[in-house]
Image (cartoon, rainbow, N blue to C red):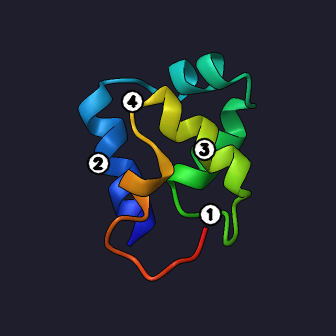
Amino acid sequence: MWLDNLKEMKKLSGLSNKQIADKTKLPERTVTRILNGETDHPRVDTLYLIAQAVGANLNDIFADTTAVV
């Protein structure tokens, strides 16, 4: 699932939710809600920013899913 992939990328980056929020200029609460799975349908542009912050891209996140981006 894309969320598992994103969480793994975050773990590998070693960044905290606060650091991701600072890098992306997103509210920390938004980053936390997405990474905790509390947001059912996060915006693609938001996922893009988070992916970039952790050194990934959307292809990495959606690699093993059937989601269309």
| 3 or 1: tag closer to the N-terminus | 1
Task: Tell me the number on the disc at residue 48.
Answer: 3
Q: Is residue 42 above or below residue 16?
A: below
Kindly report the distance in space between the C-alpha atoms of the residues bearing marks 3 and 2. 15 Å
Q: Amino acid at mark 2?
A: Glu
Q: Quadrant of the C terminus?
A: bottom right
Residue at point 67% right, 31% down? 28
Kindly report the distance in space between the C-alpha atoms of the residues bearing marks 1 and 4. 23 Å
Q: Is residue 7 above or below residue 25?
A: below
Kindly report the distance in space between the C-alpha atoms of the residues bearing marks 3 and 1. 18 Å
- Tell me the element at label 2: helix
Sort mark 1 into few (<14), some (14-19) or many (20+) by Cα contacts within 10 Å: few
Sort mark 4 into few (<14), some (14-19) or many (20+) by Cα contacts within 10 Å: few
Q: Amino acid at mark 4?
A: Gly
Q: Circles 4 and 3: CB distance less than 8 Å?
A: no
| Residue at the spot of label 2 | 8
Point out the residue furthest to the bottom here: 66
Kindly report the distance in space between the C-alpha atoms of the residues bearing marks 2 and 1. 17 Å
For the residue pair 54 and 16, the one nearer the viewer reads as 54
| Residue at the spot of label 4 | 55
| 4 or 3: tag closer to the N-terminus | 3
Kindly report the distance in space between the C-alpha atoms of the residues bearing marks 4 and 2. 11 Å
Q: Quadrant of the N terminus?
A: bottom left
Q: Amino acid at mark 3?
A: Tyr
Q: Amino acid at mark 1?
A: Glu
| Residue at the spot of label 1 | 38
Sort mark 2 into few (<14), some (14-19) or many (20+) by Cα contacts within 10 Å: few
